[in-house]
Image (cartoon, grey):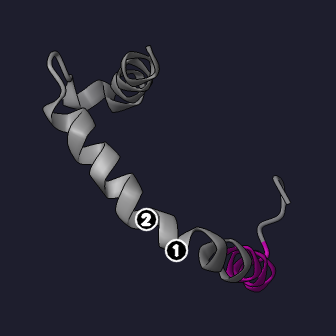
Amino acid sequence: MANDRNYEKLKAAWKGWRDASGKKIKNLYPQYVDLLNEAITFEGCRILDIRSDMNTMQAHMSA
């Protein structure tokens, strides 16, 4: 798949993945939004480096 450029084949693969995974994580999305909002307002948050800020916040919350 990494080298395939067939649009219809890639689209079908994406849709299959999305249909299967989307249903499983749909109910987690509100929690994701809440965590993201916390990360954005977390002290020292750098919007351009949100991934490391999320990791820092998660470590802080686990301590």
Pick the residue in front: 2 or 58: 58
In 3D space, how far apart are the residues under numbered discs 1 and 2 (Cα atoms)?
A: 6 Å
Callout 1: SS? helix
Callout 2: SS? helix
Residue 22 in percent (x, y) is at 60, 75
Residue 26 marker: 1
Q: Which residue is mark 2?
A: 29
Q: Quadrant of the C terminus?
A: top left
**Mark 1 nearby-residue class (10 Å; few <14, some 14–19, many ≥20):** few
Task: Residue at 38% x, 18% y: name it.
Answer: 56
**Mark 2 nearby-residue class (10 Å; few <14, some 14–19, many ≥20):** few
The part of the chain drawn in magenta is 6-18
Q: Where 11 falls versus 41 (above or below)?
A: below
Q: Where 11 falls versus 42 (above or below)?
A: below
Task: Residue at 37% x, 17% y: name it.
Answer: 60
Q: Quadrant of the N terminus?
A: bottom right
Secondary structure mainly formed by the magenta segment: helix
Q: Where 60 falls versus 29 (above or below)?
A: above
Residue 43 in percent (x, y) is at 14, 19
Task: Residue at 70% x, 81% y: name it.
Answer: 11
Say whether residue 14 is left or right of residue 38: right
Residue 18 in percent (x, y) is at 65, 76
What type is the residue that disc 1 sits on?
Answer: Lys
Residue 35 marker: none
Q: Is residue 60 magenta?
A: no
Q: How many marks?
A: 2
Q: Are marks 1 and 2 in contact (CB under 8 Å)?
A: yes
